[in-house]
Amino acid sequence: MSGLLQRRWIRQTLALTALVLLWELLSRAGVIDPFYMPPPSRVAVTLYQLFAGGEIWKHIAATFTAALLGLVGGLLIGALLGFGAAMIPPIADLLEPVMILLNAIPRVILAPLFIIWFGIGIGSKVALSLVLVAVLVFFSVYSGIREVDPRLVERVKTLGGGRGTLLREVYIPSVTAWVMGSLKVAVGFAFTGAVVGEFVASSRGLGYLLSFAQSTYNAAQTLALILIIMGFVLLLFTLAGRVERWLLHWRYA
Amino acid sequence: MIAEPRPRAAEPTPEAPAPAAPIVQVRDLRMRYGDAEPVIDGLSLAVGDGQVVSLIGPSGSGKSTVLRAIAGLHSPAGGAVELGVAPGETGFLFQDDALLPWRTARQNVALGLRLHGRAAAQALAEADGWLDRLGLAGLGGRYPRQLSGGQRKRVALAQVLALKPRLLLMDEPFASLDAIVRHHVTEDLLAWVERERIAVLLVTHDLEEAQAISDVVYLLSRGPRARIAGRYEVAIPRPRDLIAARGHPSFAPLLARIWDDLSAEVGPVGAGA
């Protein structure tokens, strides 16, 4: 037993199990009000019902699609603008103030505006998710390029490399390392954008279900939905970690 | 002020006849950063074909700046740098190894070869050959962070030597290595340079090392407006052995002479250099 406890994940699992059990007991004993804090067993039943009905999949698909489109679009647009700003000073002059402003504000406040512009369909969710991700990626690419090790640039130059070689051999790999550093945060942002967008106005998606559960004071369903979103974000985190290890294999070799 | 390039034969250096065909000829060089007082002013030196030349001087006197001017990384504010080699025939070895961290050792070596026109497969094959020659057989697949400081330095050396330079510019390349590794890397480099008759201009603060490997040692005066304060011929026959060279009868007297001159340049408070 003491041997097993040496493993961190075993200790963590045990602690979580103990917490869930305690919660279940306290809720059943009436120490905490099940109306606000339904016991884990009820959340589990709700979770099961959500999936058993099959309805949930179309909502998951909606949120996932919006988040993924926002993530990919945000990565592309952010990287492109970041590269442009770092390479062409006039672009930096135009973009930097806008990006700093967008970075300073809580960007989810743009949700109502995007719903007015793009409607309650998926467009407004993708837009919100994209803006959240693009600003983050813009700054990591922009500063990534400006902080490229000048010794590497000089090295490649003295070996006879021109602009194309520098871009391929130095700038892009160096910036990839920076962007990968913020990839996990970007995944979180992409989901934030999609779910908040749905929460504000929509007819499907996990955010929509959340908003519905909240308006009916259904705490069990709210918790179940939160668990689903957490599960998917964790899944994407793992994928992002894999992508990072693959792209930055030289760091982990 | 750009000095008129003069015919080489008409310009012997003051202390000794200039080598027949200088690979590097620097005349009246002036270097400055921004509007500050020039770091270098009125510096002239020459490196002959196949000659090993060292540039020593007080810390901060601008030794690296001279090297950067010759390498074309920094434009002179005045004077002239004439190279007797094509731009592709100059190798530059930096103080830090500056290998691409995302490329393996062989890919790093192959990069230079590819930039010099080799096809990818041939570049990699040649890179492997160079790594073998420098005692790195079997390590070609490693990334720089998986190599020791000495091994990284050898990769950087392979990267430069693979391009068959006729001129090698080195800026304290082995300063970060521990004494034993440093000795071996320097010895291997010296053997190669002597065999291939590569001209070398080495910037160092290590007086003994400079004297042991060089034919000529230049002493830079204290900056700003640094210039050449002394030129010393090292009369030790080649091929040399790094240890045996230090035992040569002429070694200690010359070392004492350069040391005195260097101390005079650094001044009474220069002990911290």
Image (cartoon, coloured by chain):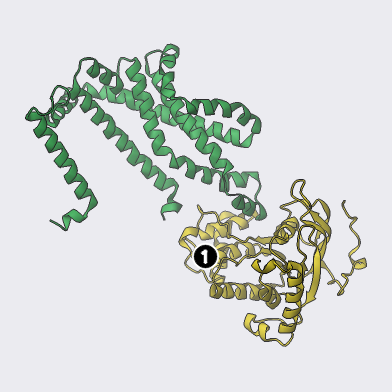
The residue at 53%/46% (across/down) is A174
Q: Chain of mark 1?
A: B
**Farthest right residue?**
B10
Furthest toward the left, the residue is A29
Q: Which chain is yellow?
A: B
- The residue drawn where x is 91% and y is 62% is B7
**Picture quadrant where residue B190 is located:** bottom right
- The one nearer the camera, B113 or A229, is A229
Q: Is residue B202 left or right of residue A83?
A: right
Residue farthest to the front?
B268
Q: Against B92, is A108 above or below?
A: above
Left or right: B28, with A193 as reference point: right
Task: Provide residue A189's location: percent of width, then percent of height.
Answer: 39, 30
Q: Please give left or right for residue A53 compared with residue B196 in the image.
A: left
Residue under the image location 22 percent in, 54 percent down:
A7
Quadrant of the rendered image containing residue A96 = top right
Image x and y of residue A71, in percent: 42, 30
Q: Is residue B170 above or below residue A183?
A: below
Snapshot quadrant of residue A21 = top left
**Residue annotated with mark 1:** B149
Q: Report x, y in % for residue A233.
A: 31, 34
A179 relative to B45, above or below: above
Three-letter amino acid code of the residue under disc 1: Gly
Q: Is residue B215 visible?
A: no
Please name whichever residue, B269 or B157, is drawn nearer the observer in this view of the structure: B269
Quarter of the N terminus of chain A within the rendering? bottom left
Front-lying residue, B168 or B123: B168
- Measured as percent of width and height from the top left, residue B165 is found at 69, 64
- What number of labels is visible? 1
Q: Residue pushed farthest bottom?
A: B249
Say what secondary structure mark 1 lies in.
helix
Q: Which color was chain A given?
A: green
